Image (cartoon, rainbow, N blue to C red):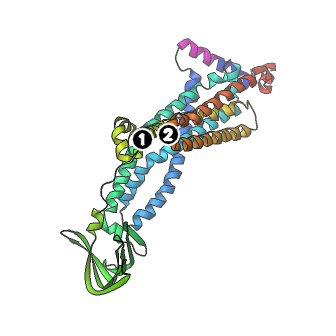
Amino acid sequence: MSFPCRRFELGRKAINQGSEKGTGVARFDRYLLSQLMALFGFFALVLVAVYWVNRAVVLFDQLISDGQSAWVFLEFTALTLPNVIRLVLPIAAFFAAVYITNRLSSESELVVMQATGFSPLRLARPVLYFGLVIMLMMSVLLHVLVPASRAKLIERQGEISQNVASRFLTEGAFLHPAPGVTFFILSITPQGELRDIFLSDTRNPDAAVTYTANSALLVRADTGPKLAMFQGMAQSLDARTRKLSVTRFQDFSYDIGALIAERGERQPTPDEMSTMRILAERAALGEALGLTTDQLRLVVHDRIVDSCLGLVTALIGFAALLIGGYSRFGLWRQIALAVALLIVVQLTANASSSYTQQNPVFWPLIYAPILVGLALAFMLLLYSGRQRHVLPESPALATGARS
């Protein structure tokens, strides 16, 4: 017996054994699901690493240049990971489905399973299980972990912004510690002395004041941190009389603590709240944030749609390659078709999201990309069922049968 015919007999035997055991998931389902999960883990790890490195480079430049420690850098990069994972999981699911389907097709395993009586819809069952697992992971990320990480990240950014050293001790850059305040340091000596200071305070538009000094020190006082400037002058412009007053000073202290106190408390946005909190406090949140109930509902439904993307990408990747049948030259045309269909789904998502953002009352339209993606996958499976190659039509299997 030739090798293709041996595969045919082994496939039929595996199906019979799976039927005799009466298990909900046949042996082929477990085999394909395990292959998909293994490749999904590999692709997810690679993509997360790529995204994380790109994000880490930007964070490293921002935090280290602001005088933060390596521990703060690691904390910030860890808080960005849930959102990075959320972005790459649907892509990793698509890559895993395409890679495994292409490999099974090139090794004639899909041909064998179809010849034993498996329809395309039946072959897609383990892919459906795989997509549901990805959807569950995405749901946990979108409804719980991503909002929690965003809230913690913004909280830590606020704490760091309250750190006077990180906000003011940056040389060669114009800083804006508060609205209407501009601060510039030309250089900082190893002893911590600030050289060539420029400070513009336009919070009062009727009396804008600009301070310049040869040197300055950042000192702590009982009432808060202060900037002690030496050998400088203060220029005050009266907007009503258009008169400029210049005052020279040997030393002058500027209250920096007042700038910090003015920042006040910030109301968290829905992106920083879990789905359960939004649903439980939607009335109070709508009043506090100035959002309608439809707008808050749209945030929740948008998360549900995003959690379903892994299921859609996996099914499209599998169904598009299934219509190609067996080919020794690979399934590159089918892979290009799968990518094109994903672009269609993404364009639908962009259009529906843009429209529902402007018209929140039509929030059900947010589910359009999911329905379009599932419909495309289903039609591809039906088409492959009509075009599938049975055993006598396969040259390899026919040769094996004659032998």
Marks counted in the figure total 2
**x 61%, y 35%: residue:** 97
For disc 2, the marked residue is 360
Q: Position of residue 117 (x, y in %)?
A: 68, 17
> Within 10 Å of the Cα at label 2, are there few (<14), some (14-19), or many (20+) other Cα atoms?
many
Q: Position of residue 370 (x, y in %)?
A: 57, 34
For disc 1, the marked residue is 292
Up-down relation of residue 18 to residue 234 (above or below)? above
**x 76%, y 38%: residue:** 329
Quarter occupied by the C terminus: top right
Is 241 or 298 nearer to us in this picture? 241
- Marks 2 and 1: in contact by CB < 8 Å? yes
Quarter occupied by the N terminus: top right
Is 116 or 55 nearer to us in this picture? 55
Q: Quadrant of residue 265?
A: bottom left
Which residue is outermost to the left? 222
Q: Position of residue 50 (x, y in %)?
A: 53, 52
Q: Is residue 327 left or right of residue 66?
A: right
Residue 18 in the magenta stretch? The answer is: yes
Q: Is any part of residue 231 visible from this angle?
A: yes
Up-down relation of residue 271 to residue 265 (above or below)? above
Up-down relation of residue 215 to residue 47 (above or below)? below
Report the magenta residues as a range.
13-24
Residue 283 in the magenta stretch? The answer is: no
Amino acid tagged 2: Pro
Is 329 or 179 nearer to us in this picture? 179
Amino acid tagged 1: Thr
Q: Quadrant of residue 263?
A: bottom left
Up-down relation of residue 247 to residue 89 (above or below)? below
Q: Is residue 14 left or right of residue 204?
A: right
